[in-house]
Image: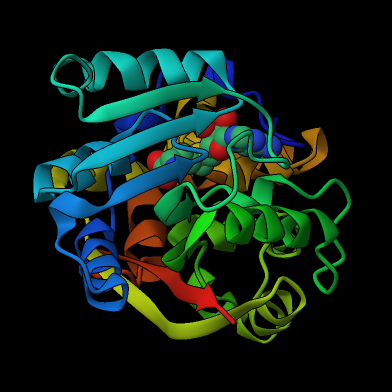
Amino acid sequence: MSKFEDYNRVSRNYDDQRYAMGSDVMAALAQFHGRKPLEDLHVLDAGCGTGNYAKAFIEYGVGKVTLLDASHGMLEKAKEKLSDHISKGKVKNVVEATMPPLPFPDESFDVVMFTLVLHHLETNPNGKDFPVIEETLREGRRVLKKSGILLILSGPTEDVYERLWFVHLNRNICNRHLLHHPQYREWDQLFQNSGLKSVSYMNVNSDIPSHSLNSLLDPEGPLREEWRNCNSYWASATEDELKDVEAKINKMKSQGTLQQFVKDHDKMNGFYILQLLCAKIA
Ligand SMILES: C[S@@+](CC[C@H](N)C(=O)[O-])C[C@H]1O[C@@H](n2cnc3c(N)ncnc32)[C@H](O)[C@@H]1O
C-alpha cells in the first residue's frame, strides 16, 4: 500500500494524465538485455496501477504479463482495460498484494518492472536511505530468472523538476516529494546492496499525448483534487501548502497573469522526462 496516497480514490481519474511513457524504450531494453524475443518473455508488472504499461507491453508483442498491485480500485481499472488480453490468456495472473514481499516462487519471471511505484514504499524518506525499496529490489532479484532483466521507471531527476510549471508555486512541496526518489548515486548503492548490477541508466524523454498535456498545463488544475490525484507529487503537500498554492493561483487569476505564469515556467516542451534504470543479477 502506498505510504502517502489513497489509490482506490485516485483510480477514478488516474488515466486523465497518465499513459505508458517510456514503455517503448523499456520493451526494447528488455528484449536487448534479455536476449529473447518479446513473445518469449513473461513480465511481472509490480505496482501495475491501471495497467497502462502491461497493455503497452502486450501490444508490442510480449508473451505473458502478471499484474500485481496493492489497490483494489487500480486493479479493477486494469482488468477492465486488459479484458481482451485476459480472455486471450496474455495476462497470466492478477494479484492484489502489498509488496514487499513479492508472492511468487524464485526465478518466475524474465522481466520484473517497477514503474513509478518504488517511491511510494518509504514512510519517512530522508533522501539517502531507502530500506523498503532495497527489500523490494531483493525480492525482484529473487523472482527473476538467472538471465532476467529488472526495469525501474522512477520520477524525474532533481533538475528536471525545475521544468514543471507547478513546482514553482511552492518549493517546499517539491523538496519534500524529492526525498521519496532515489537519484542515480542512491540507485547504484541500492543495486549493489540487493545483488543487482546496473546495465543501463538514462533519462527517457517521452512525448506527452494531447489529452494529458492539456490537463497537465491547466493553470487552475492544482485547485482541483481530481487533477492533483493524477500525480503523487501533490500527496506530499500539507493543508497549509495547498492553501498557499490556491491563494497564489487565485491572485494571479484576478491579476490576469496566470496563463503567463504557466507559459514562463513550463520548460517541458511537450515531453515528460523520467529516470529509467535497467539491472541484471550481479
Ligand atoms: C503512480 S502509480 C503507478 C502505476 C503504474 N505502474 C503506472 O506507471 O501507471 C503507483 C501504483 O503503485 C501501487 N502501490 C503503491 N504501493 C504499493 C505496494 N506497497 N505494493 C503494491 N503496489 C503498490 C499503487 O496502488 C498504484 O497503483
Classify the position of ligand 1 by quadrant: top left, top right, bottom left or bottom right: top right
- Viewer-closest of 79 and 175: 79
- Viewer-closest of 266 and 70: 70
Residue for point 24% across, 64% down:
206
Q: Is residue 120 left or right of residue 21?
A: right
Instruction: Residue 270: name its quadrant.
Output: bottom left
**Can you say whether 129 is above or below 110 in the image?**
below
Res. 254 in view: no
Q: How far across and down, in percent of the image, does residue 65 sit? A: 31, 38
**Can you say whether 218 is above or below 143 in the image?**
above
Q: Is residue 172 left or right of residue 9?
A: right
Residue for point 52% across, 69% down:
161
Q: How far across and down, in percent of the image, does residue 63 sit? A: 19, 43
Residue for point 68% across, 38% down:
99
Image quadrant holding the N terminus, namely top right
Q: How far across and down, in percent of the image, does residue 195 sit? A: 68, 75
Residue for point 32% across, 46% down:
42
Instruction: Residue 93: name its quadrant.
Output: top left
Res. 191 in view: yes
**Can you say whether 267 is above or below 21 in the image?**
below
Figure label count: 0
